[in-house]
Image: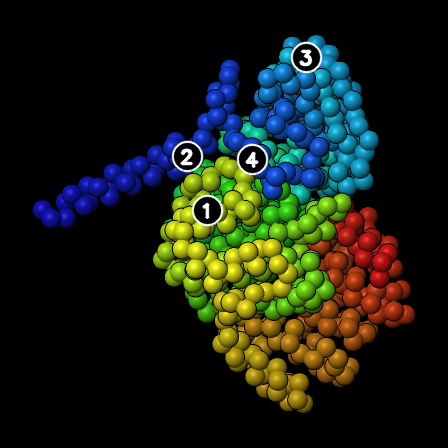
Amino acid sequence: MKTFPRLARSAALVAAVLVAACSPAKYDEQPKQEAAAGTARAVAPVLTTPDAKDIHSFARPEVARVTHVALDLAADFAAKRLAGTATLDVQAAPGAEEIVLDSKGLEIAAVTNGEGQKLQYTVGQADPNLGAPLTVRLNGAQQVRISYKSAPEAAALQWLDPEQTAGKKHPFLFSQGQAILNRTWIPTQDSPGIRQTWEARIVVPAPLRAVMSGEDLTPKGEEAKGGRAYRYRMNQPVAPYLIALAAGDLAFRELGACSGVYAEPATIAAAAREFSDTERMITAAEELYGPYRWGRYDMIVLPPSFPFGGMENPRLTFLTPTLLAGDKSLVATVAHELAHSWSGNLVTNATWADFWLNEGFTTYFQSRIMEKLYGKEATDREIALGWDELQETMNDQGGPASPRTVLHLDLKGVDPDEGMTEIAYEKGAAFLRTLEQAVGRERWDAYLRSYFDRHAFQPMTAQLFLADLRDKLLRGDTAVGQQLRLEDWIYKPGIPANVAAAPAQAFAEVDGASRAYAAGGLISEVSFAGWSTSERLRFLNDLPRKLPKERLAELDRNFRLSDSTNSELLFAWLRLAIENRYDPAVPALDRFLTSMGRRKFVAPLFEALAAQGEWGRPIATRIYAKARPTYHAVTSGTVDKALATS
Ligand code: BES
Ligand code: ZN
């Protein structure tokens, strides 16, 4: 009798969970409603404080703002253009006469209201980073419809020839919106603090399938002129950089009840194997910081030119195929992108100055998910590698006094992309580990969970976070706040002395081995084969940067480094090889740089080559001539700059 009520309750719970499976729970489907006359859709608030002013958008949301975007676009692969209409729902302040949108390189044919009557508009002077303001005279309109085409060189979009795909038969298209690239294909207010719901109808030529970062309304597509139409919608307001599109010859595999993966047919089996822990990651994340509020969590493995490891597009994380190591050793990136479903997508940096609120929180959250799935030891090793990277970045960014090492960025006059370094990720995560250590895990976790609840579907700034932290975590205890040096962490360069220590014992064995080898020890004493990927990376990164050719040959021969199918390992090896002008590794370097376009790998390798003067420059020039046309604009833009200035 004693257990019966408990059983009954859990049965009811299971039923509730089954009913709710993969659909956002009713209570959090919509953000706090602002009174919006005449529209039933959720409208998220826009912050009006000075620290929330976005200098990378022309929008003036206090005058008039976009609340909803409806796209109707067709993909023309021959012309490399998306063409059609964007219909924007507008909420204007009383007396507002115009709305200012962001645009970059768009060819605009007409602007009308919802009834098709012409509206006057102007495209202002273009800034090389920001694009141009598109100002529309409202004339009382509550809807604005723009007929337009994206430019063939739209930086968000990459149009791939069949040769650049795994299947080699069909073209492929994908978009990358973060940070300010979506204005090259969507005329809207492209600011992370102006959340918008959206819907889209995308026509692509058969047999391609279009997928987006929203709810799939037409899994099989619909007949349409010029191909098939795919419709998607997102009823939860999102920052516009999170609207994403991919189209190609795509297969899909379920991974669990609420998750799955898309990839080209040639890649789908490997992708499904690699990411088979995803559903467990979702459960772990929910146990930590509350319900996953986006319904399904799917992923897509893109062709190798995708410029990032991953991108947290809601309901559909975009991933690089360089994560497919075959042994799940690189799945931390999935944990990372999943964590963004809370930090970034639910609570979003209001401006790019507070990019660390997205990435630092996410890097911290990522390691908490990893700990739950793979244990503390393995996770400590990843945290220790992150700490090493932070030290390296500190140096690269000009040392601990450099303003480039501040969390809250000053991005006046610069492309936000320039300010987005490892500092946001690793210093941000170190800050949160420091807070956790100070108040204890239990209190910290309860706070963080409530932070996501209280600010769900809203923009966030460093100032707001600090106020929230002082109020809800420290409960006004100013002495503790001062001890924690909160302001220093966010507004000063370098790393405050109260930083929580990085795990010290994580690499005890590896470090012993690398010291012995550096001192002339035998390679047979290095038990590389028995190590995890993190341990192997630490070993390679900790070797003396200058090694005799025989030692490099021995490393390569024994550990088959040039043939490594683990992208992180190959990258670490190639860096070491370049620094030593080691010719036998050049063919592997050439292969790597012409087979994928992930910026994190590509840019440092070209920089390292350029730093090797008469040896490296010609190699860089030769390989880049072949590789550049295959890279996404995000990657080629960075490499162009690096090769021009070094
Ligand atoms: N949101 C970022 C990718 C990004 C950052 C795009 C800045 C545009 C501008 C994504 O979540 C990310 O951080 N990806 C990392 C992987 C992660 C494990 C550090 C990457 O791409 O390597
Ligand atoms: Zn991230």
Helix, strand or loop status at disc 1: helix
Name the kind of residue labelled 4 in the image.
Leu
Q: Which label's residue is closer to the chain start, 2 or 1?
A: 2
Q: CA distance from mark 4 to mark 3?
A: 26 Å
Image-based side of 91 in relation to 161, left or right: left
Disc 2/disc 1 C-alpha distance (Å): 21 Å
* Above or below for 311 versus 208: below
List x then y, in percent, for residue 18. 34, 38
2 or 4: tag closer to the N-terminus: 2
- Mark 2 CB in 8 Å range of ligand 2? no
**Local SS, label 2:** helix
Residue beneath label 3, please? 139
| Residue type marked 1 | Asp
User: Would residue 277 be found to the left or right of residue 192 on screen?
Assistant: left
Residue 28: mark: 2
User: Which of labels 2 and 1 is toward the front?
Assistant: 1
Judging by the rendered image, the residue that carries numbered circle 4 is 47
